[in-house]
Image (cartoon, grey):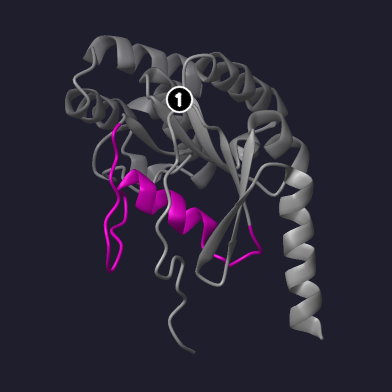
Amino acid sequence: MGANHVLNNVSCTIEAGQNVGILGRNGAGKSTLLRIIAGVESPDEGRVIRKSRVSWPIGFAGAFNGSLSGEENCRFVARVYGESIDRVVEFAYDFSELGDYFFAPTRTYSSGMKARLAFGLSMAIDFDVYLVDEVTAVGDKPFQEKCKAAFKARRERSSVIMVSHQMTTIRDYCSMFAVLEQGHIRFYETIEKAVASTTSAERVGAA
């Protein structure tokens, strides 16, 4: 198999205040694109220019140091972003609902526990742009509703770039839509046009 080009010779700009929903088939590279925008991963070529404070992908727990506890990871992140350590730790502890596990090494966490901690930590810090990968997929239903409410409050003063397989979620959160397909990204003003383009591409591929 050859290399999978998430973006191939692409140049685009997302303006401040735009809420963008990214669609694409499984394996198209949507989550990878969010990690590149966040700076969690680096592109093989080219560059990403950020002129605002951009979050890591909400729910992404890959950057936690497994030897450190949830509390210690939160303290480290708070220092990096110049935030009040006590405030960030208290917020993440209350929001994540991990109890005593908050003080245990994160390598002992399940994937769901890491997601809870990552989301709580994301909400503890104010960003200009939030990167969201399936925001509704974190935890059980009550916790998902809690996440939605917290994220709604943040969106009143911040923008969002979102990946989701749920069309209702994309429509509710976003005002511009992009389709990632075979290394290229195309922008649309309505979700109907974006979905139609993916359907057309699938028909062409099956022909």
| Amino acid type assigned to the residue bearing label 1 in the image | Gly
User: Residue at horizontal 56%, vertical 33%?
Assistant: 19
Return the x and y of residue 78 as percentages of the image width and height: 24, 23
Q: Position of residue 52 (x, y in %)?
A: 31, 30
Location of residue 201 with respect to 103 vertically, above or below = below
User: Can you say whether 24 is above or below 175 in the image?
Assistant: below
Mark 1 secondary-structure assignment: helix
Count of marks, rendered view: 1
For the point 24% across and 37% down, which residue is it? 68
Instruction: State whether the magenta stretch is mostly helix, strand or loop.
Output: loop
Work out which quarter of the rendered image holds the C terminus and state it: bottom right
Residue 106 spot, x, y in % from top left: 35, 40
Within 10 Å of disc 1 (Cα), the crowding (few <14, some 14-19, many 20+) is: many
Most foreground residue, 183 or 13: 13
Q: Would you say residue 29 sits in the magenta stretch?
A: yes
Q: Which residue is mark 1?
A: 120
Relative placement, left or right, of 104 versus 22 is: left
The answer to whether one can see residue 133 in this image is no
Q: Which residues are magenta?
A: 24-51
Residue furthest to the bottom in view is 1
Q: What's the residue at 23%, 16% (across, down)? A: 83
In x, y percent, where is residue 31? 50, 54
Residue 69 is left or right of residue 7, and the answer is left
114 and 38: which is toward the camera: 38
At horizontal 56% and vertical 39% (from top left) the residue drawn is 20
Is residue 14 highlighted in magenta? no
- For residue 202, which quarter of the picture? bottom right
